[in-house]
Amino acid sequence: MVAIRLRRHGAKKRPFYRIVVMDSRRPRESIAKETIGYYNPLQDPPEISIDLERARYWISKGAQASNTVRSLLNKISISEKQTEKQA
């Protein structure tokens, strides 16, 4: 099964995550099929960047998002809707 999940990067006590698409049976740090974004929790507010078009594509192909990635996708789509209303 294909999963959309976080891959940890960064130094000790300075986490930085890439949002990747990979086989769910592979270890967290193994080769990903595609990198679709990143998440930096140390910024204030946390910095989130996701290619929503590619995320929708992979979900339509049957990829399962992890709980954390699912909550990040919800935050991004909510903030996108707010900016569209303001424009």
Image (spheres, rainbow, N blue to C red):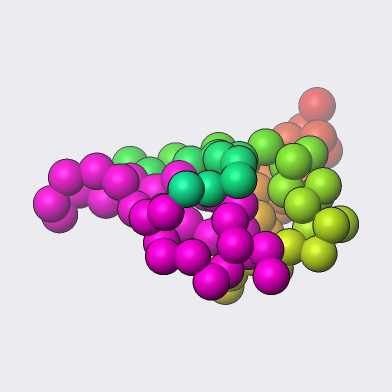
Q: Position of residue 28 (x, y in %)?
A: 41, 61
Residue 11 on the magenta span: yes
Residue occupying image coordinates x 13% and y 51%: 12
Q: Position of residue 56 (x, y in %)?
A: 80, 49
In this rendering, the answer to whether 29 lies above or below 79 is below
In the image: residue 41, left or right of residue 77? left
- Tell me the quarter of the image containing the N terminus: bottom right
Residue 72: name its quadrant: bottom right
Residue occupying image coordinates x 67% and y 37%: 51
Q: Residue furthest right?
A: 60
In this rendering, the answer to whether 24 lies above or below 53 is below
In the image: residue 65, left or right of residue 61? left
In the image: residue 10, left or right of residue 44? left
Q: Main secondary structure of the magenta part?
A: strand
In the image: residue 62, left or right of residue 47? right
In this rendering, the answer to whether 49 lies above or below 2 is above
Residue occupying image coordinates x 61% and y 52%: 21
- Tell me the quarter of the image containing the C terminus: top right
Is 61 or 71 nearer to us in this picture?
Answer: 61
Magenta span:
1-30
Residue 82: tell me if it is visible.
Answer: no
Is 3 or 16 nearer to us in this picture?
Answer: 3
Residue occupying image coordinates x 72% and y 48%: 55
Q: Position of residue 6 (x, y in %)?
A: 47, 57
Residue 18 on the magenta span: yes
